[in-house]
């Protein structure tokens, strides 16, 4: 049973470009969470999705960021018109049931560098 | 004040020493998570606990719900234990985790 997969592992974008980060949860998991870790800072919640639904996006910046988890395929975190401040490690995690009650499984992260 | 506070922020010890990392939180919770982030960046879940104590190998986690405090202990520490240890809690009613700032542990041989 493969773990949580994220790709790409490293992504370099110029300012103004779009970044697409993908997360494939563990088999059987229908809950996906995205987190951001800015350089030298702690993890911060961004968004919680179930299949085809955004449950909680209270941690998402209001502009340029969006997330989806379609019925088929991976969850995608999309950042439009990237700026240098978006440079960070983006982690996704998945669980079979709601986060609070389940052990979480993290992907290896995508390290985004905006030049 | 952060909802989750860890101490110490940095800890350096010699191989073999007994390690304690503390986590205090200010919100009502149903469970608390301890995570380990390796120097390469990967994150591993160590424990999820809602009461009492859990043990896995040389790692022990305890929680006191009334005092809103948890500790992570490492016995017979080893250089491979060097990592950042993070506690995280799901505030009651919320389907998300709030993280402590992490404790950077360095074990010297």
Image: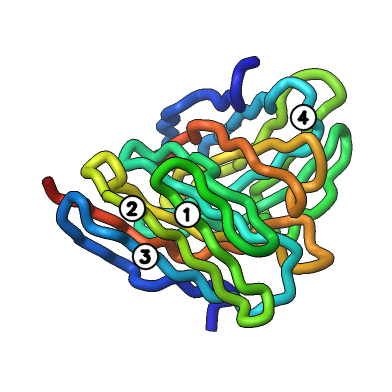
Give how far apart the Cα atoms at labels 3 and 4 are: 33 Å
> Which residue matches tag 2?
B75
Kindly state the secondary structure of the residue where label 2 is placed: loop
Which circle marks residue B20 in the picture? Answer: 3
Q: Name the chain under label 1.
A: B
Question: Where is the C terminus of chain A found, in terms of image quarters?
Answer: top left
Which circle marks residue A17 in the picture? Answer: none
In the rendered image, is residue A87 in sight? no
Question: Where is the N terminus of chain A found, in terms of image quarters?
Answer: top right
Around disc 1, counting alpha carbons within 10 Å, would you say few (fewer than 14), some (14 to 19), or many (20 or more)? some
Q: Are marks 4 and 2 on the same chain?
A: no
Q: Position of residue A60 (x, y in %)?
A: 67, 55
Q: Position of residue B66 (x, y in %)?
A: 68, 80
Task: Give B80 or A44, whichever is nearer the viewer.
Answer: B80
> Which residue matches tag 4?
A29
Tell me which residue sits at (46%, 43%) in the image. Answer: A89
Q: Which one is closest to the eye, mark 4 or mark 2? A: 2
Kindly state the secondary structure of the residue where label 4 is placed: loop
Q: Position of residue B19 (x, y in %)?
A: 32, 61
Q: Are marks 1 and 4 on the same chain?
A: no
Give how far apart the Cα atoms at labels 2 and 1 are: 8 Å
Residue B95 position (above or below residue A3) = below
Q: Name the chain under label 4.
A: A
Q: Position of residue B80 (x, y in %)?
A: 27, 39
Q: Are marks 2 and 1 in contact (CB under 8 Å)?
A: yes
Q: Name the chain under label 3.
A: B
Asked where in the image residue B78 lies, by quadrant, the reply is: top left
Residue B13 horizontal side relative to residue A52, left or right: left
Give how far apart the Cα atoms at labels 1 and 4 are: 28 Å
> Which residue matches tag 1?
B60
Which sits earlier in the primary sequence, circle 2 or circle 1? 1
């Amino acid at each position: 049973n493969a773990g949580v997969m994220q790709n790409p592992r490293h992504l370099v974008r110029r300012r103004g470009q779009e970044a697409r980060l993908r997360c494939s949860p563990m088999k059987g998991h229908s809950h996906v969470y995205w987190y951001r870790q800015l350089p030298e800072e702690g993890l911060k919640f961004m968004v919680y999705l179930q299949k085809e639904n955004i449950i909680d996006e209270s941690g998402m910046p209001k502009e340029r960021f969006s997330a989806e988890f379609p019925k088929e395929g991976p969850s995608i975190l999309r950042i439009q018109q990237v700026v240098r401040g978006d440079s960070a490690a983006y982690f996704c995690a998945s669980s079979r049931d709601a986060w609070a009650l389940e052990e979480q499984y993290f992907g290896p992260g995508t390290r985004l560098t905006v030049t | 004040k952060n909802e989750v506070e860890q101490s110490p922020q940095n800890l350096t010890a010699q191989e073999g020493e007994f390690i304690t990392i503390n986590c205090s939180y200010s919100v009502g919770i149903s469970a608390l998570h301890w995570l380990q982030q390796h120097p390469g960046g990967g994150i591993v879940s160590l424990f999820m606990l809602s009461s009492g104590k859990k043990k896995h190998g040389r790692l022990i986690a305890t929680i006191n719900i009334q005092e809103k405090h948890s500790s992570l202990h490492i016995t017979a520490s080893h250089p491979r234990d060097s990592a950042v240890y993070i506690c995280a809690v799901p505030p009651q009613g919320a389907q998300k985790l709030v993280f402590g700032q992490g404790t950077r542990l360095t074990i010297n041989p």
